[in-house]
């Protein structure tokens, strides 16, 4: 069970966009977006104290590191709020790796095996988180998430206690016994009378079906079978001829002269019905089955030797082969590669808006230039707030100049739109678009990352 962090008591350093209270807002599926970072690069240690929602024993800790060399979690009780007991302490990277920027943000899980027995038996109502990064003064550091866990225990000595809940005390009215009796009455098995009724209904239906089968004449029975398949019709024909022969022998014994005309007429009638059923079944099969590839090369109104079906008309064959052309699909790329060929610079914006635009473009794979140079063509796009800025006059005619809405729409809608829709100059916006829309793979969308590169001067 997760122990909730109630409120933030104090914090020595926190970034305005990533405060320490983010760690209190843990939700499933939100790991990575609730980050706590220090205020600015160069700080060696950052500390935050949280008050738990309720006093709890801590039996597990999950730490998501964000460029910290070491992290230490300590706890204190209400009786001694200043006596901190170390719960876990872990070193994520060496001093040399941090100095050279070899950061590997890791997740470390601590269970009962890694926590001492003395700490497991204590009840804490406060925790203190200490993050240190003394090696690299050029980066922001902190935690991406912090999860504290505890176990629910059943007090075997008191049957009125279930986990963290306690049953209301009995005041002498035997309410618990009444509840048990009512529950037992509800759980009693139902009578099996419905089974007897169901058996009677099945028996009556069976008797009716047998009577109908006896009343059915041989001619009706043969006709119903003929309507199934031509093969069954042929079998029924053989059976009917055999039965007709038997009837002939009986009828000859009674009267040889009177029964011959009736016999021939009944036989002709059955043959006529058989031919009609064959024609109707062949037509339905011809409509339902697919034509083979050899039918298209044969003449019309001729049976195909392969599928033994009539060749379709030319107009019908041509109509079946026609298909609507499929609509062209938009190209798809990873979200982090939408701006892979974009090298941009900013002009006319101030923080925090300037830093927000830069981080969104970098999250989609773009490269950022502080001082672009139009001569060597190392800059492809200029995100400009208004005309006649120094960078605008310097790069006009050599780069694509757009406003901030291009970056924000591409980031929010996860689609790279043509840049001319957002051109700052009206003449460029009226020209035909030279790019096509590119959709991002939604499964590869990355959360907004923090970058170490400083924002350039505002001009």
Image: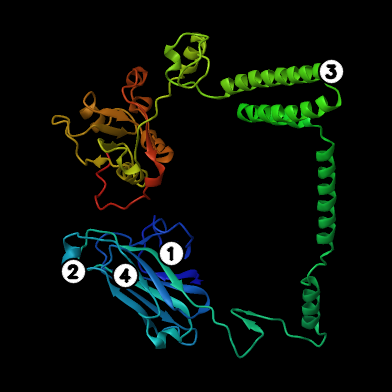
Q: Which mark is residue 131?
A: 4
Q: Which mark is residue 257?
A: 3
Query: How many discs mark residues in the rendered view?
Result: 4
Residue position marked by numbered label 1 in the rendering = 23
The reply to whether discs 1 and 3 touch (Cβ–Cβ < 8 Å) is: no
Query: How busy is the neighbourhood of tag 4: few (under 14 within 10 Å), some, or many (20 plus)?
Result: many
Q: Residue at x 46, y 86 (%)?
A: 122
Secondary-structure class at tag 2: helix
Which comes sooner in the sequence, label 3 or label 4?
A: 4
The span from disc 4 to disc 1 (Cα, nearest Å) is: 14 Å
- Residue extending furthest toward the bottom: 157
Q: Which mark is residue 95?
A: 2
The reply to whether discs 4 and 2 touch (Cβ–Cβ < 8 Å) is: no
The reply to whether discs 3 and 4 touch (Cβ–Cβ < 8 Å) is: no
Left or right for 376, reference 74: left
Location of residue 171 in the rendering, given as x and y in whole percent from the top left corner: 79, 86
Q: Which quadrant: the C terminus?
A: top left
The span from disc 1 to disc 2 (Cα, nearest Å) is: 26 Å
Query: How busy is the neighbourhood of tag 1: few (under 14 within 10 Å), some, or many (20 plus)?
Result: many
Which comes sooner in the sequence, label 2 or label 3?
A: 2
Quarter of image, res 356? top left
Location of residue 352 in the rendering, given as x and y in whole percent from the top left corner: 36, 47
């Amino acid at each position: 069970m997760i122990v909730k962090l109630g409120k933030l008591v104090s914090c020595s350093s926190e970034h305005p966009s990533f405060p320490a209270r983010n760690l209190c807002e843990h939700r499933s599926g939100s790991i990575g977006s609730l980050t706590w970072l220090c205020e600015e690069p160069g700080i060696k240690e950052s500390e935050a104290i949280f008050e738990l929602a309720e006093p709890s024993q801590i039996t597990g800790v999950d730490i998501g590191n964000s460029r910290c060399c070491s992290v230490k979690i300590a706890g204190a009780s209400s009786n001694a709020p200043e006596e901190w007991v170390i719960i876990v302490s872990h070193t994520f990277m060496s001093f040399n790796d941090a100095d050279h920027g070899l950061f590997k943000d890791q997740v470390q899980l601590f269970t009962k095996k890694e926590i001492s027995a003395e700490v497991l038996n204590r009840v804490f109502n406060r925790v203190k988180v200490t993050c240190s990064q003394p090696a690299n003064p050029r980066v922001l550091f902190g935690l991406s998430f912090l999860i504290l866990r505890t176990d629910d225990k059943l007090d075997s000595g008191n049957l009125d206690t279930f986990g963290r809940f306690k049953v209301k005390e009995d005041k002498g009215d035997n309410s618990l016994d009444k509840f048990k009796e009512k529950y037992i009455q509800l759980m009693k098995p139902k009578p099996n009378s419905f089974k007897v009724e169901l058996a009677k209904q099945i028996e009556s239906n069976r008797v009716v079906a047998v009577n109908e089968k006896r009343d059915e004449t041989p001619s009706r029975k043969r006709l119903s079978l003929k309507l199934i398949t031509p093969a069954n019709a042929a079998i029924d024909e053989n059976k009917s001829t055999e039965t007709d022969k038997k009837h002939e022998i009986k009828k000859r014994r009674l009267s040889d002269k009177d029964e011959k005309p009736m016999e021939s007429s009944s036989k002709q009638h059955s043959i006529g019905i058989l031919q009609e059923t064959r024609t109707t079944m062949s037509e339905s099969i011809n409509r339902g089955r697919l034509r083979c590839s050899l039918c298209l090369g044969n003449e019309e109104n001729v049976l195909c030797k392969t599928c033994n079906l009539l060749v379709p008309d030319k107009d019908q064959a041509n109509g079946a082969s026609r298909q609507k052309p499929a609509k062209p699909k938009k190209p798809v790329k990873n979200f982090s590669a939408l701006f892979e060929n974009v090298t941009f610079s900013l002009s006319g914006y101030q923080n925090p808006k300037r830093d927000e635009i830069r981080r969104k473009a970098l999250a989609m794979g773009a490269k950022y230039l502080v001082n672009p140079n139009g001569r060597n063509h190392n800059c492809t796009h200029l995100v400009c707030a208004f005309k006649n800025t120094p960078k605008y006059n310097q790069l006009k005619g050599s780069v694509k100049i757009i406003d901030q809405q291009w970056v924000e729409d591409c980031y929010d809608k996860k689609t790279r739109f043509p840049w001319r829709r957002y051109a700052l100059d009206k003449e460029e916006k009226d020209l035909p678009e030279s790019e096509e829309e590119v959709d991002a793979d939604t499964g590869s969308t990355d959360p907004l990352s923090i970058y170490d590169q400083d924002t350039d001067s505002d001009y």
